[in-house]
Image (cartoon, helix red, strand yellow):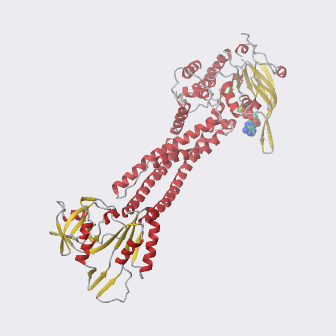
Amino acid sequence: MAEEKSKAMNVSLEATAKAAADTRAVAEFRNVSRIYRMGDNEVHALDDVSCRFNAGDYWAIMGSSGSGKSTMLNLLGCIDRPTNGEYYVSGTAVSTLNDDDLSELRGRHIGFIFQSFNLIPQLNVLENILVPRFYLEDPGIGLVERARDIAERVGLGSRTDHRPRELSGGQQQRVAIARALINDPSLLLADEATGNLDTQTTEEILELFDELHSDGMTILLVTHEEEVGKRAEQVMRLKDGAIESVAYNRPTIQR
Amino acid sequence: MIKNPFLRTFSLGVKSLLLHKLRSGLTTLGMLFGVASVVAMLAIGEGASKEAQDQIKQLGSNNIILRSVKPLEESNSNQSTRVSVYGLTDGDFARIVDTYPWAEDVVPVRILQQEVRFGERSLNPRVLATTAKYQSVTGRPMLEGRFLTESDEETVSNVCVLDYEIARYLFPFRSPINERIKIGADYFLVVGVMLPRVPIGEANQAAPGEEVTGEVILPASTGRKWFGDMQVKIRAGSRDMEQVDLHEIIVGVDSSENVPAAAAAAREMLDRTHRERDYEIVVPLELLLREQATKRIFKIVLASIAGISLLVGGIGIMNVMLATVTERTREIGVRRALGAKKRHIVMQFLVETIVLSVGGGVLGIALGLTIPEVVAAYTDMQPVVTPAAPILAFAISVGTGLLFGMYPAWRAANMDPVEALRHE
Ligand SMILES: Nc1ncnc2c1ncn2[C@@H]1O[C@H](COP(=O)(O)OP(=O)(O)O)[C@@H](O)[C@H]1O
Ligand SMILES: [Mg+2]
């Protein structure tokens, strides 16, 4: 898959259905709906959405509050299941997986980054980074070195003994990014990852995303800030649970 | 970084509990007192029961003891001199010796009221006139010298054996062996001293005001020769005369299986030959069985109390764990999103609960083992700590943790990850 990442930049909604078997697709929705039932009311948080995200893509998913961005991200991250339709992760239909399989899939293929960092307060930086690793069936060896490398890479330096509350928001988000990267995911999902950060720190985190993207990481960024959305290569706009538009921010860089 | 998954979960549990030190501490206290009370009560109960059983065993569990009991007096007897004749007779003794094959030893005992004196020191102990078999039937060991023998009986010798306490009172600084003491009006050669025994039951308690307990034992034939059949008690303005053949007959039964049958036969025989109930029958084995039954009931009561206190401790733990789970809903959601399976979450919270309950349990065992020491030091009760008690208490605390941790852990594991992540 790594070889394919660099060329996987051209996606269009029309091509989605045809290219179903295309192995470059990291994630693909086919007629996905997510309906919340509240008493007699039905909320169509996502309504018959089809789209696909290829390896190496850098997407911003935008839309007003309540448009279904988080719902989409939860489905993409396999912490939620579609009410209707099918979701394929690297070619695997999610509906065929049981709860344990889904956990394993999340651990191996998906890196989550949250708005409020969501670090585990009783663990130090290094331990926080390694949390997803220890949920794998086989965590492997050399974990501490690996965690230190990643901490270094996201710009945490040597602050690996600190507890989360001893860190600034930007540093905490760096820990969260390191944690999302520890298992080498094929998809990095960020829900309003810069929503709690000041402009300066937001810029630093976005630069980090740029770096990760240029290293070939597939990134899906949910945001309602236009400034943030501009940093992605492609922008998907949602409205009332449906895709309103898909656009390129700048020409695809051929590498 | 801890490599072992269990140790890592354990360390995480401890870290999480330390986030709320006061709450975890108070929860542990609930468990601590529950377990401590179980261990301490077991030890005290065991000790109390052992004491009672030891006392009964000293009567001889293969023995049946027949005792003369003075029947209730008629209220209109106002004479200044009365003679009451009652109790076990020489005829009863002979019948038992002749009739019952399982009666291995049959020992007659007469209790004489006589002053015992050596030099300046005097006492009014129970003076027993009995036979050589008294020692084997009661199983009482000698401290020094010898017990009475058959030949003492045959030759009607003026010899006697002293209980340890009496010997010590009369001869504070030397051995009484081969000394002559005065019993009543005559002199007796001391031939032996017996080891002390714990005072037994209600029937032969020391008279009030009597400080020195114990007995002076002399041959039955000698007793009859010097002191006759009649005992005279002088009370204010009246003289009570009592004529009792034998105050006790101790029957040593050949095996404990025959004890119930022997007891029944003896009851039946005495019931037939005595017009009044001027006797009682003490069967130590029956007392022992009754004591064991009491102990069983005691244990059931104890188990219930222990169960309730542990239930309270367990509910306390469950309560705190449910609060913890609610409080850490978001952490659970995050962990699930990061790849934790349900069983990982179950393990995490279960381990936390068990750390609480076992932590409390271990401290409780320590306290529970200290309480019996304190009781032993400040009272004359002797609690007995059986090795099973701490092991049981430990197992119970693990069990409580598992039982009461199961539901909160299950609740945590079955949270919807999306909902959990949205939780504030
Ligand atoms: N658990 C839920 N129960 C009911 N309705 C929900 C739930 N989650 C989301 N919704 C609804 O689904 C719609 C989309 O929500 P969401 O995906 O969170 O929007 P966004 O992230 O774009 O603000 C909203 O109308 C919201 O009220
Ligand atoms: Mg949202």
Asked whether, in this view, residue A193 is left or right of residue B300, the answer is right
- Residue A64 in sight here: no
Q: Quadrant of ligand 1?
A: top right
Instruction: Please name whichever residue, A147 or B223, is drawn nearer the observer in this view of the structure.
Output: B223
Asked whether, in this view, residue B12 is left or right of residue A213, the answer is left
The quadrant of the picture occupied by the C terminus of chain B is top right
Q: Is residue B50 above or below residue B336?
A: below
Asked whether, in this view, residue B335 is left or right of residue A71, the answer is left
Query: To which quarter of the image does residue A230 belong?
Result: top right
Residue B53 spot, x, y in % from top left: 41, 60
Residue depicted at x 35% and y 81%:
B86
Asked whether, in this view, residue A29 is left or right of residue A212, the answer is right
Residue A4 spot, x, y in % from top left: 73, 14
Query: To which quarter of the image does residue B66 belong?
Result: bottom left
Instruction: Please name whichever residue, A88 or A224, is drawn nearer the observer in this view of the structure.
Output: A88
Query: To which quarter of the image does residue A75 belong?
Result: top right
Residue B408 spot, x, y in % from top left: 61, 44
Q: Is residue A122 above or below residue A175?
A: below
Residue B304 spot, x, y in % from top left: 53, 57
Residue depicted at x 44% and y 79%:
B272
